[in-house]
Image (cartoon, rainbow, N blue to C red):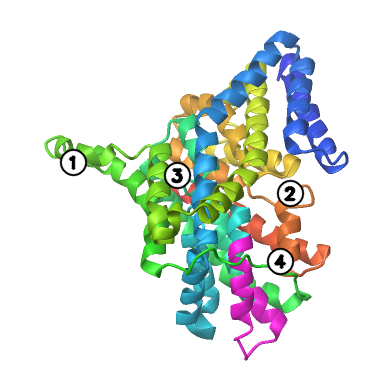
């Protein structure tokens, strides 16, 4: 390792460390903290200030050019599912059908399904009150144990789809940055995500519910704007973007003689177009004739755009930090380390995502930063980019703690103390990260 390499590593550590201090101690928004960290990395790495500023602008622009639209469209679809009462109705139906013994598994399954178009925080606020209400019907266990037996599987399901399954913005951006096949990433993400959610959800909950005590959380459910649509309509709105994206990948794996005949399936496979179509279809599916009313349309877009601003700014700043690291030469350094055989590309992606996750508290920022500096490593090692995407997503969940806003949101909804939130939520996220990595490593040995 040369002195220049050591200087680069120290610059990255100090810049990211500054971001941590500003987020945790300074209470600044990640948007401002990450931008400060980006400029410090550039300064300490020896980049001219003008070049650092250009990298900051390029990083934010590259990320937000596509991901910003995906974020906004995903949030609006989630707002429709929430405000129509459709997602709540579907979740309640799934929990009713399962019965008390199957309730933890139904809770996980509903979260995996409903979480596809929803951001983690939206899915959490939407599903946990329903799950908590269902827990009151389990008579053979204490209220505390019943609530955790249902809530933890729901959290595991939401976490898995958030990190591993496009069209969530994090994995979607990683797919684009690493030039991975979107359809294969979805398939691999589902195959790896389901057993991971089972281990971190129902199985872990069996043990965690015995050693943790909870108080009654403050749960506030918004009143739906309309009578809830049928479950079939809700399912159609949830699955439409995934079906459109996946359909566009079918012709790529068919023989050349057949593929041209179904090329039309790929027209709407672009994630932005797929989500736009899903938004337009969700309005009549979820709201019927009332979709044209101002008191229906207004809350939908207000709810979506209110959350979009903070998320988009944080994602953009994460892109800026990523680009400064790349411009300073970190990507080339990591590619050299990987090509010399010291660390496999999949494990390297996971470790980088873990470090950024612990530093910034954001799974999305961890994914964006890691995916931005891994293309050179993938090119140098010949690793499968789809598996690198999934390793990055798994690492981005590692050990949620006090600098993660989701930590405090989960704490309030579980009704746990801060130490018990570490024993439940933080361990759950770590299980998802580690088990997800093990499955990715297994897949890389097989494929």
Whether residue 144 appears in magenta in the rendering, the answer is: yes
Residue 262: numbered disc: 1
Asked whether, in this view, residue 245 is left or right of residue 425, the answer is left
Q: Which residue is mark 2?
A: 404
Foreground: disc 4 or disc 3: 4
Q: Is residue 271 above or below residue 78?
A: above
Question: Mark 2 and mark 1: span between their CA atoms?
Answer: 45 Å
Give the mark, 4 or 1, whose residue is nearer the N terminus. Answer: 1
Q: Which residue is mark 3?
A: 444
Give the mark, 3 or 2, whose residue is nearer the N terminus. Answer: 2
Mark 2 and mark 1 in contact? Answer it, CB < 8 Å: no
Magenta segment, which residues?
A: 125-148
Q: Is residue 433 above or below residue 365?
A: below
Image quarter hosting the N terminus: top right
Q: Which residue is mark 4?
A: 413
Asked whether, in this view, residue 166 is left or right of residue 184, the answer is right
Give the mark, 2 or 1, whose residue is nearer the N terminus. Answer: 1
Residue at 47% of width from left, 50% of height from top?
A: 442
Q: Residues within 10 Å of mark 2 (few under 14, many from 20)?
A: some
Give the mark, 4 or 3, whose residue is nearer the N terminus. Answer: 4
Question: Mark 1 and mark 3: span between their CA atoms?
Answer: 31 Å
């Amino acid at each position: 390792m040369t002195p220049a390499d050591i200087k680069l590593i120290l610059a990255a550590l100090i810049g990211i460390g500054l971001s941590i201090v500003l987020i945790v101690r300074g209470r600044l928004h990640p948007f401002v903290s990450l931008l400060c960290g980006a400029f410090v990395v550039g300064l300490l790495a020896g980049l001219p200030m003008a070049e650092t500023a250009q990298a900051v602008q390029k990083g934010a622009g590259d990320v937000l050019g596509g991901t910003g639209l995906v974020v906004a469209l995903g949030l609006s679809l989630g707002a429709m599912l929430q405000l129509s009462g459709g997602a709540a109705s579907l979740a309640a139906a799934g929990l009713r059908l399962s019965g008390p013994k199957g309730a933890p598994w139904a809770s996980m399954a509903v979260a995996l399904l409903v979480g596809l178009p929803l951001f983690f925080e939206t899915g959490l606020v939407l599903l946990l009150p329903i799950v908590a209400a269902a827990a009151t019907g389990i008579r053979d266990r204490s209220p505390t144990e019943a609530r955790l037996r249902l809530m933890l599987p729901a959290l595991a399901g939401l976490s898995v789809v958030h990190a591993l399954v496009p069209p969530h913005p994090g994995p979607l951006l990683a797919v684009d940055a690493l030039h991975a096949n979107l359809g294969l990433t979805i398939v691999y993400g589902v195959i790896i995500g389901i057993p991971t959610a089972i281990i971190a959800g129902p199985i872990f909950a069996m043990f965690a519910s015995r050693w943790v005590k909870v108080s009654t959380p403050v749960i506030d459910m918004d009143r739906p704007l309309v009578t809830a649509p049928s479950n079939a309509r809700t399912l159609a709105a949830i699955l439409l973007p995934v079906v459109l994206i996946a359909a566009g990948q079918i012709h790529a794996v068919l023989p050349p003689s057949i593929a041209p005949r179904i090329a039309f399936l790929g027209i709407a496979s672009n994630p932005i177009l797929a989500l736009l179509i899903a938004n337009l279809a969700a309005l009549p599916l979820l709201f019927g004739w009332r979709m044209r009313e101002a008191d229906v349309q207004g809350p939908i877009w207000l709810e979506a755009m209110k959350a979009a601003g903070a998320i988009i700014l944080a994602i953009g700043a994460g892109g800026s930090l990523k680009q400064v690291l790349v411009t300073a030469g970190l990507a080339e350094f990591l590619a050299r380390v990987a090509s010399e055989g010291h660390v496999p590309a999949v494990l390297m992606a996971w470790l980088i995502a873990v470090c950024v996750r612990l530093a910034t508290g954001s799974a999305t920022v961890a994914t964006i930063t890691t995916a931005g500096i891994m293309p050179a490593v993938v090119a140098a090692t010949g690793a499968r980019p789809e598996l690198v995407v999934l390793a990055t997503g798994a690492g981005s969940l590692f050990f949620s703690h006090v600098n993660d806003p989701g930590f405090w949101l989960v704490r309030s909804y579980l009704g746990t103390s801060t130490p018990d939130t570490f024993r439940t939520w933080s361990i759950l996220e770590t299980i998802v990260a580690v088990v997800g990595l093990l499955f990715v490593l297994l897949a890389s040995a097989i494929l």
